[in-house]
Image: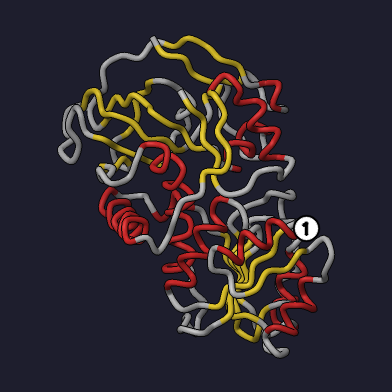
């Protein structure tokens, strides 16, 4: 038996409840993993609220680290006793033990502890595919400006450091002076407090009127129009989240009027659809973390039983860096 967090219907944090579930032996292509730490992400809130509709009842959580207890037929890259971590479908990481497909589970290097492993996989792989794979048509070169919203969040702080390592000038936005200072301390070239400043005007000032080549935006509705106005001609608007709500429909003609812009809506799970791609991306992430170029900031820890409190803090944007659930 295992404790797991489940909801029976979409709604607020009050829907989250701990239940006892039976965990059997892994089937073909599956593993059974005992978690040591669990990651918290905004996608968990989208799924809980019903913004991302999934069948009910639903066990939540997309990210964790732990010990492989058993492997099913056909699984060759993992063995019982391996330290492992993942960011993966289907949901279910808010649990002590679970069965899951082995495709997106990777061995966790000994130099990376379980808490860090749980805090870094979904957010770190997201930063990886954004900065290395989601690129404007003209590419990114050292010295180029990029705009990254929510720069003091879990993905944002990793992106600030990784962008600096790549020689990019990351302009970060955040909702307080303290969060802006945190982004700057982690490698952002500039930080804009969007509650006090017009981020479009500030981006234009910083780039001497040129705009940025790419905007990485997990905020959604509230930043959409302003983000388009921050782009230089042929720039890329890369949307990868909806923290303020989904982007409303828009007329494609506006992209031409604003400089023949490109728009893409990205999701991690397209990028990690194969074991080979997952492993290659994870290897890059592990390398920058072990080198010290990227440090994973775990700023909040909540016990698994306090998951509702954790969700409320994340929704209220009261968190910085990464948040984990402890067992």
Give the left or right position of residue 2, taking residue 214 as reference: left
Give the left or right position of residue 100, taking residue 153 as reference: left
The residue lying at 35 percent from left, 40 percent from top is: 113
Given residues 160 and 41, the one toward you in this image is 160
**Which quadrant is the C terminus positioned in?**
top left
Across the whole image, how many numbered discs are drawn on residues? 1
The location of residue 144, given as percent across then percent down, is: 54, 83
What colour scheme governs how the chains and residues are painted in the rendered image of this protein?
secondary structure
The location of residue 260, given as percent across then percent down, is: 65, 83
The residue lying at 30 percent from left, 14 percent from top is: 24
Question: Residue 88: which quarter of the image?
Answer: top left
Q: Which residue is mark 1?
A: 222
Given residues 149 and 102, the one toward you in this image is 149
With respect to residue 149, does 46 lie above or below?
A: above
With respect to residue 4, does 151 lie above or below?
A: below
With respect to residue 35, does 233 lie above or below?
A: below
Question: Residue 31: which quarter of the image?
Answer: top left
The residue lying at 77 percent from left, 68 percent from top is: 225
Give the left or right position of residue 47, taking residue 258 as reference: left
Question: Residue 210: which quarter of the image?
Answer: bottom right
The location of residue 72, given as percent across then percent down, is: 20, 26
Assign a secondary structure to mark 1: loop
Give the left or right position of residue 194, taking residue 106 as reference: right
The residue lying at 50 percent from left, 81 percent from top is: 137
Q: Residues within 10 Å of mark 1 (few under 14, many from 20)?
A: some
**Which quadrant is the N terminus positioned in?**
top left
With respect to residue 196, does 219 lie above or below?
A: above
The location of residue 215, given as percent across then percent down, is: 62, 70
């Amino acid at each position: 038996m295992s404790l797991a967090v489940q909801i029976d219907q979409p709604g607020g944090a009050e829907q989250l409840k701990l239940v006892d579930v039976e965990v059997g032996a892994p089937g073909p292509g599956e593993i059974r993993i005992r978690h040591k730490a669990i990651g918290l992400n905004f996608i968990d809130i989208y799924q809980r609220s019903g913004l991302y509709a999934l069948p009910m009842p639903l066990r939540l959580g997309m990210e964790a680290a732990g010990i492989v207890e058993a492997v099913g037929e056909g699984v060759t890259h993992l063995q019982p006793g391996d330290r492992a971590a993942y960011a993966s479908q289907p949901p279910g990481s808010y649990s002590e033990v679970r069965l899951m497909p082995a495709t997106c589970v990777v061995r966790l290097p000994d130099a990376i502890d379980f808490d860090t492993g749980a805090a870094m996989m979904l957010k770190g792989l997201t930063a990886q595919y954004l900065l290395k794979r989601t690129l404007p048509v003209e590419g990114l070169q050292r010295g180029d400006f990029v705009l990254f919203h929510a720069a003091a969040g879990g993905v944002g702080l990793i992106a600030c450091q990784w962008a600096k390592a790549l020689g990019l000038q990351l302009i970060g936005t955040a909702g307080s002076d303290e969060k802006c200072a945190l982004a700057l301390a982690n490698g952002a070239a500039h930080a804009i407090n969007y509650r006090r400043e017009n981020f479009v005007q500030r981006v234009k000032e910083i780039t001497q009127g040129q705009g940025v080549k790419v905007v990485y935006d997990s905020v959604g509705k509230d930043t959409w129009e302003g983000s388009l106005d921050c782009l230089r001609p042929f720039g890329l608007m890369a949307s990868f989240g909806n923290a303020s709500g989904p982007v409303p429909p828009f007329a494609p003609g506006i992209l031409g009027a604003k400089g023949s812009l490109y728009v893409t809506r990205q999701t991690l799970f397209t990028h990690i659809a194969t074991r080979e791609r997952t492993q290659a991306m994870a290897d890059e992430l592990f390398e920058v973390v072990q080198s010290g170029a990227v440090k994973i900031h775990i700023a909040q820890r909540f016990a698994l039983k306090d998951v509702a409190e954790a969700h409320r803090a994340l929704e209220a944007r009261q968190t910085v860096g990464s948040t984990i659930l402890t067992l």
